Every structure is written in C-alpha cells, then in structure tokens.
Amino acid sequence: MGEDRPAWARRIAAERAARDWSQRDAVRALRAHAPSDLPSEESMIRQWKRWESGALPSDFYQPVIAATFGTVTNALFPAPSRRDGNQEILAVSGMETLEIVSRLNRSDVDTATLDALRITTDRLCSEYPYMPSAQLLIEGRQWLRRVVELHSKSLTLAQHREVLALSGWLALLVGCVEYDSGDRHAAESTRRAALSLATEADHPEVAGWAHEMRAWFALTTGDYRGVISAAQAGSEVAGQHGVAVQLAGQEAKAWARLGDRRQVEVALDRGRRLLEGMPHPENLANHFVVDPAKFDFYSMDCYRLVGEDKLARTLAEEVLRAGTDFDGTERSPMRNSEARVTLGVTAARAGDLEQALIMGDRALQGDRQSVPSLIMTSRELAAEVRRRYSAEPSAQEYLSRLATLGEQTPGFLPPA
C-alpha cells in the first residue's frame, strides 16, 4: 500500500504488525473491545482492509480500534488544535505586555487585566516545549513576580483566588524549567510553593501537577517507590483533571523500572480510560495539558523497559511523526529526543550498533532538553551498549560523552 495513506491508516497497520497479528487476529481483538456485537468475521476483515487502505472508520469504530491498541481515540485519529496560544494574547485582550504591566501598577485590578494575565500564563506554558530554557526561566520568573505582587492590591475574593491560581501555574512552569536545567533544589522549592498556592486557592488541578512534579523528580533520580507514592497522592486530589492521566503515566513508568509488567498495564489502562473520557483539549501546546499523543509517549517508555521492542519502536516512530512538522521543525523536541533513545535501544537489542549510536547521538543534540529525563533514558541505552558492545571504540566514545553530560548535571545519578 502507498505512503499516501493517512497517518492513522499507516499506524493501525504498523500497530498490528508490531503485535504479529494477521488481520483476522486484529478483528478478533477488536471484537473483544467492542461495546456491542459486531458483524460477521469475514465482513469485519473486509472492513479492516478498507481501514488500512485509508477509509476512515466511523465514530463507533474509532474508540474501539484505539482501545484495541491500548491508546485513545484522539491519539490515533487526531482532531485539529482549535487555538493558537501564541497569538491569542493580543487578539483576545488587545493588550501588549507593556500595557499589562502598566495596568498591574494600578491600585485595583479589573477583569480585563486578569484575562490578559491568564492568556499570558497560557502562552508561557505553551512555549515550554521549544523556548530556550534560560529565556523561558527569565520570563517565567518575571511574570511570577508581577502576579505575586498583585496580592498587595485591592482584590475581591474571586480575584484573590484567581491570582493565587495564576501564581501556582507560573510556579509550576518555573519549577519545571529549573529542573530541566539541572537545578534540582530550586525546582523542589518552587514546586512546594506551587503546592502551597494550590492549597490556599483550593485548586485541585495545580495541586495535582505539583504532585506530578514530585513523581517526575523521583523518577529521574531512581526513587521508583517515591514515584508511585507521589502519583497516588496526586490522584487523590486531581479528580478528573487531565493531570490524573499523567500521574497514571508516571506510575506506569515506575512500575516498568521495577519490573512489574502487570502493574504497568493496570496503570496505563487507568490512564487510557481517563483520557478517553475527557474532551479534546483546546490548546495542545500548553505543557500542563495532557494531549492524546502524550499517552503514546508514556506507553513507548514502558514498552521499551519491559522489552516489547516492536511495540516500543512503533510508538517511537509515531511520537516522532506527531512531534515534527512537514518542514522538519520539531514541535516536541524533548519527546522526540526520548523517542530517538527508544529507537537506539531497540536497534542495540537487534544488533545494529551503528543505528543505536546514531539515534543516541541525535537525542543528545537538541537545543531544548530536559537534562534529567534525557540522562535517565540515555542511561538505559548506555546499559544496552555497554552490555553488548563494550569493546567497540564507537561505543566507548558514546559512553564517554554520556558520562560527561551526567557529570555536568549536579544532583543526578551518572549513567549506570
């Protein structure tokens, strides 16, 4: 079949092949996830062939196909983003930064100013995936300082809670960038501040993300039981907000590193069911929005760790496709780096050292990196390279570069 097929059609064929399923096997698996009886097997096989050829499944079949492959509908059949966060501040509020800052200096705060601050916060959170860390850290801290200073103004009760929530979101963003940059202790202090603000504002979503950050910190420092504890604490306060899906993903990653395959599947399925029941996000670029493609990213990490190489490779290729524009611009450089590590690990296990090192090197070259996460996943590639190819000069050179990166990031474990 030609490559002019839609991306979703190519993906369901790749997902089927990764499981070594025939089309008949796929139909039988589909039937197990269907909420009602399906037509005869031969009829469904003909239907499946049409889908793999590019005929779009109906709204009934789309979630069933997604569940069959352990993902969510909007990851497999993406809906278009409905908002450009980078343009909205001026279009909606009509305010430039200078005017917002000028309004903040007044003795009272009006609704338009709070709206502009809300949009500014959303814009900053949307720039997280690609803006250089140093620049985002400066801007994030500046806006956090401005918003915190609003507490000295004359505010209504509702405005006070809104300012607390905005302060919480900006603190979460700053803490994430601090951690990406290797400043572990500053990140933990900022995370605690965000949690305190969330508690005062009675804001479960910000509180859930503060717990998610603790799970992420624990994951990248090898405290896997700490990940599970933080994820469960976050789930208790997060309710039905999107962060509950990410908490399930972090828990699944921890179970994968502890070697408990059953708990991996339980956590992933919990996250998948939560995400399937949520409306499609308006702004997919916002770091604190769990977009459907992110679920494939969680699953990729888990399948790599439990040795399901075909599934891990298929999902890594999907993460790269979803995170790269047609002109080659990377929308999600940090996810793409980890996808390349996954491709490196599966290549190493398949005996292809050259491809493993190409992918490992490309993962280290991105301008926008989450250094702790990159060290963690690259350490797993290093373990495969060391185990299988320790005598090869090219392997030794890669391991040396990775060790240097670990040494340059105080507070994080060096490659194993």
Image: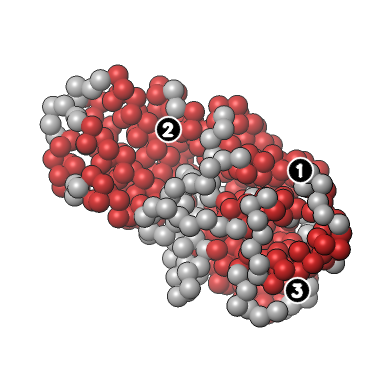
Disc tally is 3
Local secondary structure at mark 2: helix
Disc sitting over residue 72 in the figure: none
Local secondary structure at mark 1: loop
Q: Can you say which quadrant of the picture contains the N terminus?
A: bottom right
**Residue beneath the point at 38% across and 58% down:** 131
Vertical arrangement, residue 197 with respect to residue 180, above or below: above
| Amino acid on which the number 1 mark rests in the picture | Pro
Density class for disc 2 (Cα within 10 Å; few <14, some 14-19, many ≥20) is many
Q: Which residue is label 2 attached to?
A: 194
Q: Which of the two discs, 2 and 1, labels the residue nearer the N terminus?
A: 1
Density class for disc 1 (Cα within 10 Å; few <14, some 14-19, many ≥20) is few
Q: Which residue is label 3 attached to?
A: 389
Disc sitting over residue 35 in the figure: 1
**Residue beneath the point at 50% across and 68% down:** 324
| Amino acid on which the number 3 mark rests in the picture | Tyr
- Expressed as whole percent of the image width and height from the top left, the position of residue 245 reads 60, 41
**Is 380 situated left or right of 120 in this image?**
right
Does any portion of residue 305 appear in the rendered image? no
Q: CA distance from mark 3 to mark 2?
A: 45 Å
Please identify, in this view, whether the residue under mark 1 or under mark 3 is nearer the observer. Answer: 1
Q: CA distance from mark 2 to mark 1?
A: 42 Å
